[in-house]
Amino acid sequence: MAETYIARSSAIAARMLAGEMMVMNSLDSTFFTLNEVATAIWQAADGRTPLREIVQEKVCGQYEIDPEQAQKDAADFVTELSKHGILLVADHPLADPANLEER
Amino acid sequence: MSLMVEMGQKAFDLGVPIAVHLDVTYRCNERCIHCYLDHNDRGEMTTAEIKGVLDQLAGAGVFFLTFSGGEVFLRRDFFELLEYARRLLFNVKIKTNAVMIRENEAQKLRELGVDTLQISIYSHRAEVHDAITKLPGSFDRSITAIRFLRDRGLKVTIANVLMTGNLGDQYHLQKLAAELGVHYTVDPTITPMMDGDTSVLSLRIPGEELREVFRNPALVGNMEEFCAPPNPPTSDDLEGYSCSAGHSFCYISPYGDVFPCVQFPLPSGNLRRQKFVDIWNHSPQLNEVRSIQAKDLTVCSSCSHVSSCTRCPGLAYMEGSMRGPSTADCEKSFYRTGIPTANMLRHDGKLPPRPLVQIQPLAL
């Protein structure tokens, strides 16, 4: 099975507020908030680490969750954010477009 | 309530500075007849100082960052600052006259993921716009820049200031904005100059003209709703606060001075001497601004407009008291609804004259 790689779009802005990550796409003003688990995946989206590994390390390693369900939920989440141009998705490693730093 | 409004309210309730307006220079290549700024450089923050401020703002939770001036592109390091801000993941809006934006600049702005550019245009007629900016050719250059930006998918808003010199052109300019495929805003607020010179106030449009502006659905949307008489205030209204100034928003000058808002010249600290978070959390001035509820207002708490008035505490401060009325907003409330304000009633139904002060840098 091919790996999935994810990277954050250079058009996004993001900041933590009261435990939630606000994410906004400047191209279409789409505005999201991400919960703790989604934030962990989003922060690890460096374009080089396969999504499967991110979920294993950042989700299954930190939270009580069925690994198979976690991989499925993560795939749905990634699909949703990629539709809005917030995450770039490919079957090969990607450069992290903006070399982004979260606070 | 939209998600963004909900997060804005959360920031307000928690006292997180979710939005900051940062002027990186007061220098400008235009000399707009209504501008309140002194355009001399009196010791702007350096590149390193501004980057340090941006680091602090990101750490404090600032999400929405507005770069403004003066004309931001007069700073040779502006793209360096912008790139730095975007690496810190701010949502960046830029206020500019766009005169210096050509294809290369537009492309860079697009690549850096700038959210919106707000561009000052005062008329659909080049001669009227250029007479206001005192820069020949500025209309053509700014409109060309808008096309470059729009063609690259950037969001652009044309911002028009209504004054005596362009009154009547606002509808034509709105049409031009629509033709260009960009947003349009209009504001009748003219403020005194930084040195206290109030001569620019003569450019304010007569109050009666506001009545006409407020009755144009093209400018205000649902006119009946916009001009409806105010609802009687509820206890929530009276326990409410004026606006986000000092609660979840503040202004930083090119010299590092911190104020509650760009229109609220109450010096509250300086970033060359203090950390942003210390100013934000402990400034007596900001804490005083935050403490004021509608029920504490000396005149406005008893005004029938208190639940819907756009009362600006900064303009009120410039009139003498941050707890007092802002006559410019009394004027808007009156001409919007036809119902006199409490401030007018105590002056025999007339709007009082208003002594005003403007932004003064902190003494270093």
Image (cartoon, coloured by chain):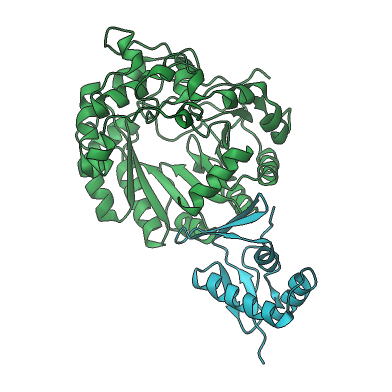
Chain colours: A cyan, B green
Q: Who is closer to the viewer here, B134 or B261?
A: B261
Q: Where B2 sits versus B250, above or below?
A: below
What residue sits 40% from the left and 23% below the top? B191
Total numbered circles: 0
Q: Along the horizontal axis of the image, is B319 left or right of B177?
A: right
Rendered location of residue B80, percent (x, y) = 61, 50
Location of the C terminus of chain B (image quadrant): top right
Q: Who is closer to the viewer here, B253 or A13?
A: A13
Q: Along the horizontal axis of the image, is B352 left or right of A37?
A: left
**Is residue B173 in view from this perspective?**
no
Q: Who is closer to the viewer here, A76 or B102?
A: A76
Image quarter for residue B269?
Answer: top right
Q: Along the horizontal axis of the image, is A37 left or right of B197?
A: right
Q: Along the horizontal axis of the image, is B232 left or right of B282?
A: left
Hey, which residue is sitting farthest bottom in the picture?
A: A1
Rendered location of residue A2, percent (x, y) = 66, 90
Q: Where B226 sits versus B116, above or below?
A: above
Hey, which residue is sitting farthest right in the picture?
A: A61
Rendered location of residue B120, percent (x, y) = 37, 40
What residue sits 71% from the left and 76% below the top? A48
Image quarter for residue A46?
Answer: bottom right
Hey, which residue is sitting farthest front in the picture?
A: B235
Rendered location of residue B359, percent (x, y) = 52, 21
**Is residue B103 in view from this perspective?**
yes
